[in-house]
Amino acid sequence: MVDQSPGPGTGAFQAVERVRRTPTSDLSVAEAAALRRVGLSPVGFVMGTAVMQLVSAYAGTSYGGMGIAGGMGLGGGMPWGGFLSSARSSGLYAESYPCVHGYGFGANADHYGFSVENTALGSSLFEGYRLALSRLEDEAIALGAHGVVGVKLHFEHMVGSAGTATFFATGTAVIHPSSEPLPTPFLTNASGQNFERLISLGFIAAGLAMGIGVVYVQPNCLARGSLTAVGANNQIPAAIGAARGRARQALAGTGHKLGEGVVHTEWSDRRFVRMGESWNQLALAFGTAVRRYTTEMQPSMTRAVVPLRP
């Protein structure tokens, strides 16, 4: 574009600078169309990243400082049975799994196993995700966005030791051109189509609700996969169930603080931070906390009625 009006002291054409802005997003065509129907436009693809050196389950030490003392105790030498009793008395999940061969302690002590809830690691993981989401939110605020849709959480080992984790949060920042800025942008993991449906039902996204459960597993001879041990493996399913149960409880707790319910819950199960033959069983649940903005009854949908009699 050029300006044809003569400049001071000259009749030459002068270039006029034009600012062009091209928003990015990870929306599909259908998602972008659904958001347009509720008056939202994408303003940019946003991301938050955090790198955490995680905390171990016991005594608040790093992972390098935690170990099994001769199969009989943990760290400072607390008796094995006493440790589990102490964990249970604190309200934590803890369960023992004796050797299926019937061996005693001593040379065969490693055939014994146990599972115990790892609240320290759970808190550390929660903080990593929280920090990544906070930085995603900062990018959205810098763009003047009203919210972020399609939020996804990622978890990787990118740098550092086995106890170091990298957290990513990604999504598309959106804006409602005719509305005033919000104090903080809303966050939702719902897709564009699901977000459109949520608005049509009279609900708004109040934030992301998240729950994490972690169980440390020291496997017995059967859970270790010993060829001389046969039968049902109860230790691993129980650890997965306990981790999921804690994640569900935490999800409900954070959802209650934010809104009136949680929708679009996503689940992730994985083994994390191996130490020899032991590992941490992780369960992550996150979804969108919602709050009603209208109490008007939605019109009932018309349904076709097909007579069954001639």
Image (spheres, rainbow, N blue to C red):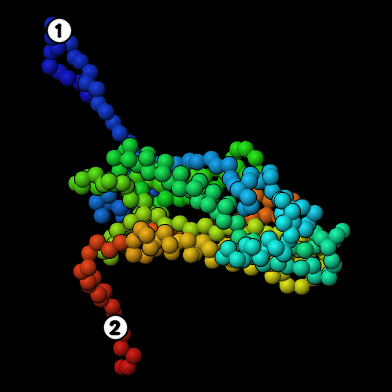
User: Which mark is on residue 131?
Assistant: none
- Pick the residue in front: 44 or 216: 216
- Residue depicted at 37% across the width and 39% down the height: 139
Relative to 239, is 230 on the left or the right? right
- Closer-to-camera residue (138/111): 111
Q: Secondary structure at mark 1?
A: loop
Q: Residue at x 40, y 55 (%)?
A: 208
- Of the residues shown, which amino acid type is indicated by label 1? Thr
The kind of residue tagged 2 is Val
Can see residue 299? yes
**Residue holding disc 2:** 305
Decide which of tag 2 and tag 1 comes sooner along the chain.
1
Give the residue displayed 45% in from the left and 50% down from the top. 152
Q: Is residue 296 above or below residue 33?
A: below
Q: Nearer the viewer, residue 140 or 95?
A: 95
From this viewpoint, is residue 191 visible?
no
Looking at the rendered structure, which numbered label has been put on residue 10? 1
> Residue sitting at 20 percent across and 47 percent down?
179
* Residue 44 horizontal/vertical position (percent): 35, 40
Helix, strand or loop at label 2? It is loop
Residue furthest top as drawn: 9
| Placement of the C terminus among the 4 image quadrants | bottom left
